[in-house]
């Protein structure tokens, strides 16, 4: 039987991509990564893909005169691969409304904060500056507004008194690597759906995000 397929979009290190690859290799996730697309030619995640024999594409936004043309090229490449789910894994370009509309209900992102707190960049420093007791990561379907769309799973870490943005980011990232493959699996297994209005898990409305706690989903 044909495996459900992903296209993964990256811009940098690709550690979340690696977590997805590892989940596939350990058969936690039954999926095929059709391609990894980066807007940065030097993204380390491209090397990770190449060493797994995954097709890579570089679509460098600097070569396109407008966001629309860049997005159109992305759509053309992604559609030719017919993925079941488009996975943003550290993709650092804002995607236009047409792109988001085009992949509505099958475009997922991971963001390093407990959304709706701290949309955008420098989330770890913001959590420290605001003396938050906890911080974390959220997996969400992508909505039109930046870092919006219904949140599927969140994982929380305590902020420690001596945390720097780097130490906090590292702890959050470890949890990102756990929750992202789980959310992707739920989508590909048809358990999780975003119908445009609400999230459904096993055909029931998911009223609040699932929580990843002590290696368990609650
Ligand atoms: C992660 O913190 C992710 O939440 C954010 O960008 C970072 C990407 O890291 N969107 P990596 O490239 O997966 O290592």
Image: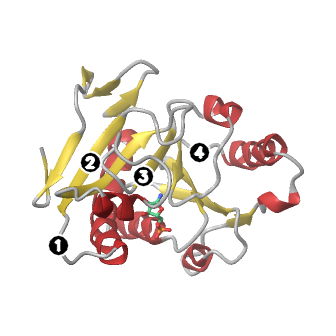
Q: Say whether residue 124 is visible.
A: yes
Query: Within 8 Å of ligand 1, the CB of disc 3?
Result: yes
User: What residue is disc 3 on?
Assistant: 110
Mark 1, secondary structure of its residue: loop
Estimate the x, y position of residue 124 in percent, counting from the top left.
36, 63
- Relative to residue 194, is residue 161 drawn left or right? left
Q: Nearer the viewer, mark 1 or mark 4?
A: 1
Estimate the x, y position of residue 39 in percent, counting from the top left.
70, 62
- Identify the mark at residue 154; answer none if there is no mark: 2
The CA span between labels 2 and 4 is 25 Å
First in sequence: mark 1 vs mark 3: 3
Check the image and report above or below for 19 versus 139. below
The CA span between labels 2 and 1 is 22 Å
Q: Label 3 near label 4: C-beta < 8 Å?
A: no
The CA span between labels 1 and 3 is 26 Å
Residue farthest top in this picture: 197
Q: Which residue does the image show at 80% across and 40% down from the upper left?
A: 68
Mark 2, secondary structure of its residue: strand
- Relative to residue 198, is residue 52 drawn left or right? right
Mark 2 nearby-residue class (10 Å; few <14, some 14–19, many ≥20): many
The CA span between labels 4 and 3 is 18 Å
């Amino acid at each position: 039987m044909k495996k459900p397929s992903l296209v993964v979009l990256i811009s940098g290190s690709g550690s979340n991509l690696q977590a997805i690859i590892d989940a596939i290799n350990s058969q936690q996730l039954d999926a095929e990564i059709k391609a990894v697309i980066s807007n940065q030619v030097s993204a380390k995640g491209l090397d990770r893909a190449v060493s797994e024999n995954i097709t890579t594409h570089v679509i460098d936004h600097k070569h396109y005169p407008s966001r629309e043309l860049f997005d159109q090229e992305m759509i053309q490449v992604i559609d030719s691969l017919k993925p079941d789910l488009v996975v943003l894994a550290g993709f650092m370009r804002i995607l236009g409304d047409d792109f988001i509309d085009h992949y509505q209900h099958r475009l997922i992102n991971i963001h390093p904060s407990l959304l709706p707190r701290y949309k955008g960049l420098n989330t770890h420093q913001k959590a420290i500056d605001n003396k938050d007791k906890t911080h974390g990561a959220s997996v969400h379907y992508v909505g039109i507004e930046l870092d919006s769309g219904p949140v599927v799973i969140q994982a929380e870490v305590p902020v420690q008194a001596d945390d720097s943005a780097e130490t906090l980011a590292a702890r959050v990232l470890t949890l990102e690597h756990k929750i992202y493959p789980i959310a992707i699996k739920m989508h590909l297994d048809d358990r999780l759906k975003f119908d445009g209005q609400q999230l459904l898990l096993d055909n029931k409305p998911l009223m609040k995000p699932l929580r990843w706690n002590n290696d368990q989903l609650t």
